[in-house]
Image (cartoon, rainbow, N blue to C red):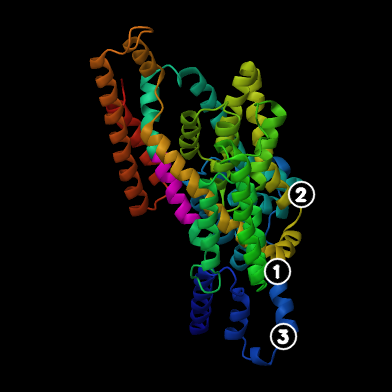
Amino acid sequence: MSTALESKTETITAVNDKKDHDPSSPPPHAVDLESQTPDATKASPALSSDNEDHALEDNTNVPHLSLLRLFWFFFANFGLFAWGGPVAQIALIKERLVIRDKWITLARFQRVFAVYQILPGPEAAELCMFFGCLSAGRIGGIVAGLGFIMPGFVLMLVASYLYSLAGFENKYFNASFRALQPIVAGLILRATHKIADHSVVNHQTRRPNPWLVIAALCTALNGALRINIFISLGLYGVIYMLIARRLFIPAAILFVLQYVGYALYVVFKGVPSPVALALGIAKTPSLINLFLLGLVAGTLSFGGAYTAIPFIQVEAVLKGAWLTQRVFIDCIAIANVLPAPLVIFATFVGFQGGLVDDGLGHAFAGAVVITLGIFFPCFVFTIAGHHVLERLVRNKFLSSFFDGLCGAVIGVIAIIAVEILRSSIEGSPSPATLFAESLASPAGFGPPERDSIQLALRRTSQSASAAVLYVIALGVLYRFTNKWTALLLLAGGAVAGQFLFVD
């Protein structure tokens, strides 16, 4: 009896370990039945399938909580402790609800998580909504999602308000955030690598898929050529869908046509401007525009929260120009130190946009509407029902389209990572620096040579310090994978800024 039990435990552990590395592997219950049941080889395949399906749909261990208790459960157990990014958040949910409380089996959790990895939106929030649905229906899913998101949202709202009070004139405040900018650039580049690890890898062979790697590289090239990123994403989704069906000739024609069309555009209208990367849905930060900006970013954030960064950046910083690159990078830094999904940075963007548009009242309203917009798609996808989602992503055409889209997203994030790196190294002058430069260059008298040299040396020194911080941050992020690494890096950077960047 003891031997049989040990054998069962080893079998389940081995299969679960394999499952962690291969989302497409079969659920462990099939192996468990074969290894433990003497007559398993004689069992009907239909019966085994029925038993497996029953195990994957069994909700008998799920507690039925009232909506208030459900909200507090996810607020207190997950929302307040959502530190360390999506990997730590998902591990926390899995450890409490699957391993400890056994709401569902590990095999079912892996299957659910595999679906949410393909869909846009933060997976941790979607998992909370899924468990909320199991406990109290669709309304329960909404309540659980709100419980998970609320702590980070409130903290970001407070941080946005404090930043608006002190973030533009205080030299010590600006110095700390100046040091955080290259660290944020390192975080985004490291995240690009992490996302690529599962976005351009064949789930069966666990090896890089060359077609998806090409899609990522070509999308990055298209970004450098200033081809609209939404065109690239849709195009490479279709191209990979054709390749998956072995329709190589139509795929090659589409691939060539994109550059023929670009060449014709350049001949007749010239090289596209940087704002051509955007759709232009948020030229001004009105409330409706902020909601649409969040909605588009949330709908197209395949691969995780970092994929929402380029969509919002091109609209708010490049096209709309109502948010500076410096402030945009600062909001990502703040989001990394809060217990929340990273997409909560959109709350900060909405606050600053509303502040620019019509004062403090609109700032708080802007923060709310953009947050509603960016989380709305993942609420809709999850509340729609896991069965519907699973049929959707298992459709051969749509599944390959999503794969191509996810591969192309890597190129988009890479372009934004390089752009943020350049901005963080060069830096944007603080108000104190601009004031010093205006004194050094009085109108009509020309710049005093000595003062100009000193200002140039100061900027060069700050750029060199930022470059060193970037290299250190990147080295630490690759060396240490603890969930507190990013938080400690940002805290250390804020302190270092007081010594490196105080004018």
Residue 347 in sight here: no
SS at mark 2 in the image = helix
Residue 158 in picture, x, y percent from top left: 54, 26
Residue 62 in picture, x, y percent from top left: 68, 57
Q: Residue at position x 51%, y 43% from top?
A: 81
Amino acid bearing label 1: Lys
Question: Where 73 sits versus 281, above or below?
Answer: below
Question: Where 107 sits versus 384, above or below?
Answer: below
Per the rendering, the mark at residue 45 is 3
Quickly name the residue at label 1.
Answer: 396
SS at mark 3 in the image = helix
Q: Left or right: 491 with respect to 413?
A: left
- Near-viewer residue (127 or 430): 430
- Kindly check if marks 2 and 3 are in contact, taking CB atoms under 8 A apart as contact: no
Question: Where 129 sits versus 252, above or below?
Answer: above
- Kindly check if marks 1 and 2 are in contact, taking CB atoms under 8 A apart as contact: no
- Circle 1 crowding by C-alpha within 10 Å: few under 14, some 14–19, many from 20: some
- Near-viewer residue (124 or 418): 418
Q: If you read the primary sequence from the N terminus, does the residue marked by circle 1 or circle 2 appear first?
A: 2
Q: Residue at position x 65%, y 29% from top?
A: 283
Specify start and end residues of the magenta stretch as a single range: 183-195
Residue 359 in picture, x, y percent from top left: 62, 16
The C terminus - image quarter = top left
Q: Residue at position x 48%, y 79% from top?
A: 6
- Circle 2 crowding by C-alpha within 10 Å: few under 14, some 14–19, many from 20: some
Magenta-drawn stretch contains 9: no
Q: Main secondary structure of the magenta part?
A: helix
Amino acid bearing label 3: Pro
